[in-house]
Image (cartoon, rainbow, N blue to C red):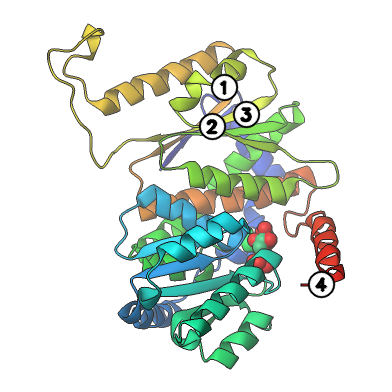
C-alpha cells in the first residue's frame, strides 16, 4: 500500500517536523497503543484448532456483536470476499434483521460467536438469549455450537464455563474498536478461511515502520486546525463500504470528545460522483479527503471494439474507466485546492487490509495526542445506554 501526501497541501517536511516535535514516534509502544502487540504463534495455533473443531460441525458462523465487536471483521470480509465458510452478522437489534438471519440458517450446521468486550452490551445480550433459547428448543447442545469472546473476567467467560463452550479473551487493555487483530477479528476470519497470517503481517509492517500512519495523523490534525473539521473517506471500490463504516466508528468515537472531533464522512467512487462530489469540489472548504484506489481487480472485463454511443470506450477495460474517473475526481478536487491523501492498494487482500487498518489505528491515537483528546473510551455513549437500561428495567416482560 502506498500513501501519497503530495496533494495534501502540506509539505512532507512539515508533517515530519510535527511528528518529531510532538514525539509521535515514541508514542508507538505497547503501553500507549496496546493493540500493536500482535497475537503470538502459540496463541494463534490454539485459535486455529478451536475454529477447526467448530468447522467440523458447522458451515456457517453467525457473528453476534456490536460496534468494534463486528465491524472490523465485516470490513475485511467484504473487501476480500473469498470465503470458504459462511459468515452472517447480527450487529443490530432490529427484530427483522435478527429473524431474517435466524430463519435463513440451517441450525444443524450453524455456530454462533458471541463477541462483547464488556459482556454486557444490551443488543448482544438480547440476541444471545434468543439464540440460546432457540438452540434449547431444537435440542442442540449450546456448548458445541457457541463460542464466546470477551474480557477475561466478564459474564461471557462465566457463560462459556457453564455451557462448556470455548472462550477467547480480548487483552484487557485493547478496547472494542481497536480489537480487530485480536480473537475478535481473527476467530471469524479463520472460520471464513481468510489468510490471517497475511493480515497480521500487513499490520506488523506498519508497527515496525509507522511513519505513514503518523504522517496521516499529522496531516489530518493540521487540516483540523485550519478548520477542516470533516474528514471524508472515499474508496474507489464497491467492496470497501464496510471499511468506511469501521473508519467512521474509529475516527468518530475515538476523537469526538470535549467539544473536539473530526466528523467522518463516507462516500464511494464512482457512485458518489453522481451524488455528493459537487459539494466536495465546490462547497465549503471544511473537509480533508482520503481517496482509496485499488490497482488490481479480481475480474476486469474488456469492452468490445464496436461500441455504442461513446466511441472512446472502444476496447477499454472496465478498470480503465474506473481509473479515469478516479483521476478526474482527484483533478477536480485539486483544481479547487481541496486537500487529498491518496491510498493506493495493490489489491483487496488480507495483507493490504491489515496494513490499512493498522495505519488508521496508530493514526487515530497519534491524532488524539495532537488534538489533546484521549482516544480510548466513549463516555458520552453511556448516557443513552443508561436511559435504555432504565426503561427496560421499569417495564414488565
Ligand atoms: O469501541 C468500543 O469500545 C465500542 O464501540 C464497542 O465496540 C461497542 O460498544 C460494543 O461493546 P462490547 O464489545 O463491550 O459489546
Splitting the image into 4 quarters, where does residue 214 fall?
top right
How far, Cα to Cα, is label 2 from label 1? 8 Å
Residue appearing at x 40%, y 36% in the figure? 237
Front in this rendered view, residue 115 or 208: 115
Among the two numbered marks 2 and 1 on one chain, the one whose residue lies closer to the N terminus: 2
In the drawing, does residue 123 fall left or right of residue 160?
right
Residue that appears at 64% across and 88% down: 158
Measure the alpha-carbon separation of dots 1 and 4.
46 Å
Q: Residues within 10 Å of mark 1 (few under 14, many from 20)?
A: few
Q: Earlier in the sequence, mark 4 or mark 2?
A: 2
- Measure the alpha-carbon separation of dots 3 and 4: 49 Å
Q: Earlier in the sequence, mark 2 or mark 3?
A: 2
> Nearest the camera: 82 or 14?
82
Left or right of 330, for residue 93: right
Ligand 1 within 8 A of label 1's CB?
Answer: no
Q: Look at mark 4 in the image and give the residue it sits on.
A: 396
Spatial CA span between label 4 and label 2? 43 Å
Q: Which residue in the protein does label 2 denote?
A: 267
Question: Tag 4 or tag 1, which sits nearer the N-term?
Answer: 1
Label 3 environment density (alpha carbons within 10 Å; few <14, some 14–19, many ≥20)? many
Residue at the spot of label 3: 288
Amino acid at each position: 500500500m502506498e500513501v501519497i501526501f503530495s496533494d495534501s497541501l502540506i509539505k512532507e517536511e512539515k508533517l515530519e517536523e510535527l511528528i518529531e516535535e510532538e514525539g509521535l514516534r515514541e508514542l508507538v509502544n505497547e503501553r500507549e497503543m496496546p493493540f500493536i502487540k500482535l497475537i503470538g504463534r502459540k496463541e494463534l495455533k490454539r485459535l486455529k484448532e478451536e475454529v477447526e473443531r467448530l468447522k467440523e460441525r458447522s458451515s456457517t458462523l453467525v457473528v453476534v456483536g456490536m460496534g468494534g465487536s463486528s465491524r472490523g471483521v465485516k470490513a475485511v470480509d467484504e473487501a476480500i470476499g473469498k470465503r470458504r465458510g459462511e459468515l452472517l452478522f447480527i450487529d443490530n437489534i432490529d427484530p427483522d434483521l435478527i429473524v431474517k438471519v435466524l430463519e435463513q440458517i440451517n441450525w444443524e450446521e450453524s455456530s454462533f460467536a458471541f463477541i462483547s468486550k464488556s459482556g454486557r452490551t444490551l443488543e448482544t445480550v438480547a440476541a444471545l438469549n434468543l439464540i440460546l433459547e432457540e438452540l434449547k428448543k431444537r435440542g442442540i447442545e449450546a456448548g458445541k455450537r457457541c463460542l464466546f469472546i470477551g474480557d477475561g473476567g466478564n459474564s461471557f467467560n462465566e457463560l462459556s464455563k457453564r455451557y462448556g463452550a470455548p472462550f477467547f479473551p480480548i487483552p484487557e487493555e485493547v478496547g472494542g474498536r481497536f480489537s480487530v487483530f485480536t480473537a475478535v477479528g481473527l476467530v471469524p476470519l479463520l472460520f471464513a478461511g481468510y489468510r490471517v497470517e497475511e493480515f497480521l503481517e500487513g499490520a506488523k509492517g506498519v508497527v515496525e515502520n509507522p511513519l505513514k500512519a503518523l504522517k496521516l495523523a499529522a496531516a489530518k490534525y493540521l487540516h483540523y486546525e485550519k478548520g477542516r473539521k470533516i474528514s471524508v473517506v472515499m474508496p474507489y471500490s464497491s467492496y470497501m463500504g464496510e471499511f468506511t463504516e469501521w473508519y467512521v466508528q474509529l475516527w468518530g468515537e475515538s476523537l469526538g470528545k470535549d467539544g473536539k472531533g473530526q466528523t467522518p464522512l463516507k462516500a464511494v467512487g464512482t457512485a458518489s460522483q453522481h451524488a455528493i462530489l459537487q459539494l466536495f469540489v465546490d462547497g465549503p472548504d471544511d473537509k480533508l479527503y482520503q481517496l482509496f484506489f485499488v490497482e488490481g481487480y479480481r475480474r476486469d472485463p474488456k469492452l468490445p471494439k464496436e461500441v455504442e454511443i461513446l466511441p472512446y470506450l472502444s476496447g477499454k477495460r472496465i478498470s480503465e474507466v474506473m481509473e479515469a474517473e478516479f483521476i478526474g475526481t482527484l483533478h477536480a478536487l485539486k483544481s479547487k485546492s481541496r486537500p487529498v491523501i491518496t491510498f493506493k492498494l495493490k489489491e483487496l487482500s488480507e495483507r493490504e487490509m491489515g496494513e490499512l487498518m493498522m495505519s488508521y489505528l496508530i493514526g487515530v491515537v497519534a491524532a488524539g495526542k495532537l488534538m489533546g483528546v484521549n482516544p480510548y473510551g466513549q463516555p458520552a455513549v453511556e448516557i443513552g445506554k443508561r436511559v435504555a437500561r432504565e426503561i427496560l428495567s421499569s417495564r414488565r416482560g
